[in-house]
Image (cartoon, grey):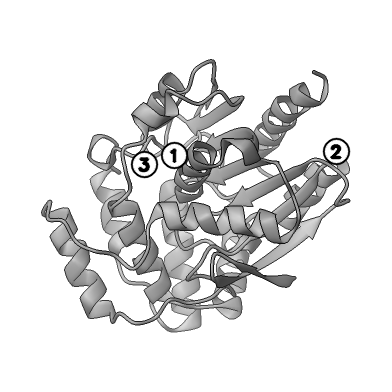
Amino acid sequence: MAKAESNGIDIEYETFGEPSSPAILLIAGLGIQLIAWDSEFCKKIADNGYYVIRFDNRDIGLSQKCNGMSMQEIMQKMFALFMGKAEPVPYTIDDMADDAAGLLDFLNIKKAHICGISMGGFIAQTFAIKYPDKTLSLISIYSHSGENRAFQPTQEAMEAMLAPAPFERESYIEHMAKFFRLAHGNGLEFDDEFHKNLAAQSYDRSFYPDGIARQYLAILTQKDRTSFLKTLKIPSLIIHGDDDPLVPLSGGQATADAIPESELKIIKGMGHTMPNLKNMWWSEILEEMLKHQNRLLNK
């Protein structure tokens, strides 16, 4: 792995494949480190002729932390935002899209396929709007178009998401496994070992709850992108499960409805799952991504 100076901060990143191949930038979700883009998944994309870049968003993993605000202050801002009050926040989804653009500049990549999952989808959509000249195509997974109040998690998922993570390692692993299980969906058996291993790796690599909370402030203050998405002239693939308790299917449908000529892929029984090629949903997602990207190669 390596560090890049991007948008005034240090970003941790890793690549797979040949730099001369078409690039795909993988953007992670809320509090999720680059390792959640499973290495086997990244290698499989690279084996199909792509230069794969995965990275830690700011304030998470090994990328630069923002600091300067206590957890108590963060929670006060969060409560005020829930109550509909305007609040300044440390950074925005737009800032995180600028980080991604700066990473491509650092790597001397003029254009890339931009793929984001969950919060990463918000960032990917924002990237495509702000940097259409850098965007070969857009892939938005488990995301919505930015209108937070229209696309709420279930009550159970919201409570689980806001529950503080334990500081002790084994308790943290159990806590995260329970959350992943809740988000998983009912169409496939939950892989407990895979998710506990991911939680353990994440804890050992960088346990930093404050950064997750600040990222959530960015989500709460994101713009409704609908009118901007309607102006996109970029090939776009929207993927969503029909059993997602964190971002309802209507959020993915709204994104697809907004982007002209976009393709919507709905996966039956799938919730909000982490990339894992042992899971047939993600094998299907990989197939759809490659099909989407390869269309541009064949034009």
User: Residue 217's x, y, as percent?
Assistant: 31, 61
User: Residue 225's x, y, as percent?
Assistant: 36, 35
Q: Answer few, some or many: residues within 10 Å of disc 2's Cα (few below 14, many 20 plus, some between 14 and 19).
A: few
Report if the CB atoms under discs 1 and 3 are less than 8 Å apart: no
Q: Answer few, some or many: residues within 10 Å of disc 1's Cα (few below 14, many 20 plus, some between 14 and 19).
A: many
Q: Is residue 80 left or right of residue 269?
A: left
Q: Judge whether residue 276 can be spotted in this image.
A: no
Disc on the earlier residue, 3 or 2: 2
Q: Which residue is mark 3?
A: 245
Choose mark 1 or mark 3, whichever is in front.
1
Q: Answer few, some or many: residues within 10 Å of disc 3's Cα (few below 14, many 20 plus, some between 14 and 19).
A: many
* Callout 2: SS: loop
Residue drawn at (26%, 57%), measured in percent from left and top? 159
Amino acid type, residue under disc 1 in the picture:
Ser
Mark 1–mark 3 distance (CA, rounded to whole Å): 12 Å
Quadrant occupied by the N terminus = bottom right
In this rendering, is residue 70 above or below 199? below
Residue drawn at (70%, 61%), measured in percent from left and top? 106
* Snapshot quadrant of residue 108: bottom right
Q: Which residue is mark 2?
A: 48
Residue in front for this viewpoint, 38 or 180: 38
Q: In the image, which disc is placed on residue 242?
A: none
User: Residue 98's x, y, as percent?
Assistant: 52, 55
Amino acid type, residue under disc 2 in the picture:
Asn
Mark 2–mark 1 distance (CA, rounded to whole Å): 26 Å
Amino acid type, residue under disc 3 in the picture:
Pro
* Callout 1: SS: loop
Q: Which residue is mark 1?
A: 143
Mark 3–mark 2 distance (CA, rounded to whole Å): 32 Å
In this rendering, is residue 229 above or below 66? above
